[in-house]
Image: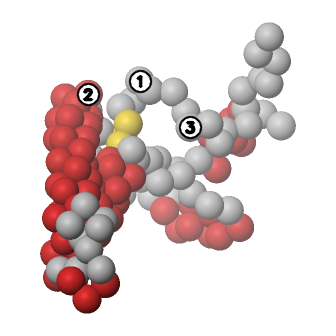
């Protein structure tokens, strides 16, 4: 069990790679048994921009979704026939879109950031 074998099984994609390293076919055959890492390596400046704006978008859409849902259900006191269904569905879609944007924004990392928690090449003796 060498750390080199573990590094070869992890696949990180960079937005600046053109994929012309020549061993794409061997990697595709080797990854068929496991799950490839879905992290995207970006420069630090782009990481900061993605993190800030995706978090802002996620927070505003989730809060806006709850406001719309609150309005549609009259603070959850409206009887079922009086619920404004289009606004309620819009609120739920806002909440879901904020969640999805935040989840996908966590895939980005910079070159200097540590590996994901799924890597087993780190010692487990933490104390």
Give the labeled residue for mark 3: 116
Position of the N terminus, as image quadrant, is top right
**Residue with the mark numbered 1:** 112
What residue lies at 19% left-to-right and 41% top-to-bottom? Answer: 56
The reply to whether callout 2 and callout 1 are in contact (CB within 8 Å) is yes
- Residue indicated by mark 2: 44
User: In the image, is residue 88 above or below residue 54?
Assistant: below
> Compared to 85, does 106 lie above or below?
above
Percent of width and height locating residue 49:
17, 35
Where residue 98 appears, x then y in whole percent?
A: 27, 56
Which residue is at the front of the view, 126 or 78?
A: 78
Depth check: give the residue in front, 55 or 32: 55
**Secondary structure of the residue carrying numbered label 1:** loop
Q: Residue at x 26, y 28 (%)?
A: 44
Q: Is residue 93 above or below residue 83?
A: above
Residues at marks 3 and 1 touching, judged by CB atoms closer than 8 Å: no
Quarter in which the C terminus is drawn: top right
Q: Residues within 10 Å of mark 1 (few under 14, many from 20)?
A: few
- The Cα atoms of the two marked residues, 3 and 1, are separated by 12 Å
């Amino acid at each position: 069990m060498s750390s080199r074998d573990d590094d070869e099984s992890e696949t990180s994609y960079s937005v600046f790679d053109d994929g012309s390293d020549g061993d794409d076919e061997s990697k595709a055959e080797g990854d068929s048994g496991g799950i490839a890492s879905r992290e995207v390596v970006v420069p630090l400046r782009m990481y900061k921009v993605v993190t800030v704006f995706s978090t802002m978008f996620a927070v505003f859409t989730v809060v806006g979704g709850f406001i719309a849902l609150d309005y549609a259900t009259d603070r959850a006191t409206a009887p079922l026939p009086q619920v404004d269904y289009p606004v309620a569905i819009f609120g739920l879609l806002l909440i879901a879109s904020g969640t999805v944007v935040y989840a996908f924004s966590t895939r980005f990392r910079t070159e200097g950031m540590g590996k994901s928690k799924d890597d087993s090449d780190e010692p487990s003796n933490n104390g």
